[in-house]
């Protein structure tokens, strides 16, 4: 399962107004670590589909949202609950470490 | 059990794999889950790797090395090594997913990791203006004034690359002259967006939610000053990645894995090391590749001296698992 992409147009609907906890992966094509962490996020998404929505936002295509959330380093993974950012994880990490960072939202 | 496991997937690891695979040792290469391909994956133009007169993109070079290793039968696993047991003739490697692999020989090509400044605000502002990867994060500093800390080739490369985005790049260096190669220095000196601040060390990074400046101390006069910048890229060198082995292998005073002379032989029989993890002086893709070649040849020679009963064990299990 590949995490679906969100855009400026559907960000409110997919993320802000989502009743579930959502992790937004801010990424870009030219970012090696983003490509490396992407399949790991897909796995976490597949294994935790009932607890967490994982979506991807391309910062190249949507610079305004990247600026709004003050992204200066990618991959940046932001967890949203009720429209608010409750957790930020920066940088590609191995799966066990990411799961540890996200533990509060995977239970 | 296998004949050989290679840990690391930079130029040293893949070159070792090409040689080991061509020697029919059917190597298993543990590539890492998120850093596969190593340091060159975050590099753009590689202009000094022989055979590429027009230069080559770091990720393209690593993909080609991987393809070459796989062509001869290298098995690549995208996982991290959790722990190793290097004592005795049979070496054990435990992976992040819990898999346990055994082999008669192991090559460490684990490279090095970015060095940090060691300032408390560095961690706090990491991802909020403090970065270690210009190719990943330069994009977010369009039109901003930023700083690069360091005086080596990677600092010059990052500074030059970042002028594509930034309005001005300050290079902060502790000394009065650069360590970088002549061509990289000349390129940086010729770039009018790059400004050098000499004999200065960074003693603080400021900013409440995001970086807004640096506190510098003049290494000659001791005077402190502040430099307003919106971002800071740290390129002050690398430390060899030896955390898996520091209880099991001898290290040098520089922190690299100690090897005998010009060989790849570590303090433990059957364990070899190659690339940046044994090299604190050259640290080039081509020297790492050469060192990986040496490690594979050393390992091949070592395996040829083992009792046939042991070798058969490595061979037999493989036949069983293949069926």
Image (cartoon, coloured by chain):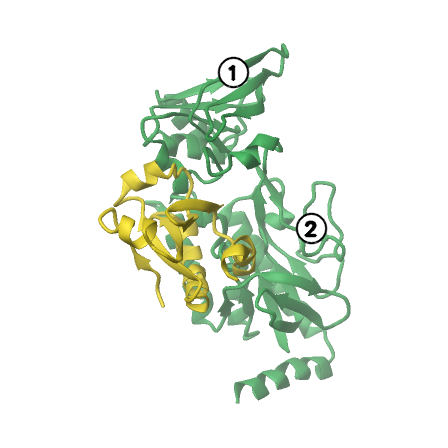
Chain colours: A yellow, B green
Q: Which disc, if any, is residue B226?
A: 1
Identify the residue at image location x=69%, y=50%: B257
Q: State yes or no: discs 1 and 2 in contact (Cβ < 8 Å).
A: no
Residue extending furthest toward the left? A9
Circle 2: element type: loop
Circle 1: element type: strand
Crowd tier of the residue under label 1, counting other residues whose Cα lies within 10 Å: few below 14, some 14–19, many 20 or above: some
x and y, in percent, of residue B279 in the image: 62, 45
Location of residue B309 in the rendering, given as x and y in whole percent from the top left corner: 72, 84
| Quarter occupied by residue B253 | top right
* Res. B102 image quadrant: bottom right
Residue for point 67% across, 52% down: B243
Image mark 2: chain: B
Q: CA distance from mark 1 to mark 2?
A: 39 Å
Residue bearing mark 2: B257
Q: Is residue A84 left or right of residue B299?
A: left
Which is nearer the N-term, disc 1 or disc 2?
1
The residue closer to the viewer here, B87 or B138, is: B138
In the picture, measured across the screen, residue B305 lies left or right of residue B51, that is: right
Residue A102 against residue B71 in the figure, above or below: above
Which residue is at the front of the view, B317 or B181? B317
Question: With respect to residue A60, does B293 lie above or below?
Answer: below
Q: Is residue B273 left or right of residue B132?
A: right
Give coordinates of residue B218: x percent, y percent: 59, 14
- Total marks in image: 2
Report whether mark 1 lies on the same chain as mark 2: yes
Name the spot of residue B74 as percent of width and height, x first. Answer: 50, 70
What is the chain letter for disc 1? B
- The relative height of residue B298 versus residue B262 in the rendered view (above or below) is below
């Amino acid at each position: 399962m590949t995490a679906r992409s969100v855009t400026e147009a559907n960000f409110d609907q997919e993320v802000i107004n989502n009743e579930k906890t959502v992790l937004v992966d801010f990424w870009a094509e030219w970012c090696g670590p983003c490509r490396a962490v992407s399949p790991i996020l897909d796995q976490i998404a597949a294994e935790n589909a009932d607890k967490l929505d994982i979506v991807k936002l391309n910062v190249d295509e949507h610079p305004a949202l990247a600026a709004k959330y003050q992204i200066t380093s990618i991959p940046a993974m932001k967890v949203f609950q009720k429209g608010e950012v409750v957790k930020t994880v920066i940088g590609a990490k191995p799966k066990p470490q990411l799961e540890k960072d996200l533990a509060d939202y995977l239970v | 059990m296998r004949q050989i496991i290679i840990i690391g997937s930079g130029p040293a690891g893949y070159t070792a794999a090409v040689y080991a695979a061509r020697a029919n040792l059917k190597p298993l290469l543990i590539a890492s889950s998120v850093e596969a391909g190593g340091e060159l994956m975050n590099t753009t133009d590689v202009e000094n790797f022989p055979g590429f007169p027009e230069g080559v993109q770091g990720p393209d070079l690593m993909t080609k090395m991987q393809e070459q290793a796989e062509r001869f039968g290298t098995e690549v696993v995208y996982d991290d090594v959790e722990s190793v047991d290097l004592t005795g003739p049979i070496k054990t490697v435990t992976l992040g997913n819990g898999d346990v692999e055994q082999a008669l020989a192991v090559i460490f090509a684990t490279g090095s990791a970015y060095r940090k400044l060691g300032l408390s605000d560095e961690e706090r502002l990491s991802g909020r203006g403090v970065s270690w990867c210009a190719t990943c994060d330069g994009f977010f500093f369009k039109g901003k004034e930023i700083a690069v800390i360091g005086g080596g080739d990677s600092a010059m490369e990052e500074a030059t690359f970042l002028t594509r985005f930034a309005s001005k790049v300050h290079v902060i260096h502790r000394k009065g002259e650069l360590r970088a190669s002549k061509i990289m220095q000349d390129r940086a000196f010729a770039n009018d967006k790059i400004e050098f601040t000499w004999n200065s060390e960074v003693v603080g990074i400021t900013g409440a939610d995001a970086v807004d400046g640096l506190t510098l101390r003049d290494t000659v006069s001791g005077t402190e000053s502040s430099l307003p910048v919106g971002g800071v890229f740290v390129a002050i060198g690398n430390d060899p990645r030896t955390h898996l082995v520091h209880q099991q292998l001898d290290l040098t005073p520089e922190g690299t894995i100690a090897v005998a002379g010009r060989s790849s032989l570590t303090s433990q029989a059957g364990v070899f090391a190659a690339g940046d993890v044994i090299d604190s002086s050259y640290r080039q893709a081509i020297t790492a590749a050469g060192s990986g070649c040496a490690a594979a040849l050393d390992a091949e020679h070592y395996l040829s001296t083992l009792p046939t009963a042991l070798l058969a064990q490595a061979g037999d299990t493989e036949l069983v698992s293949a069926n």
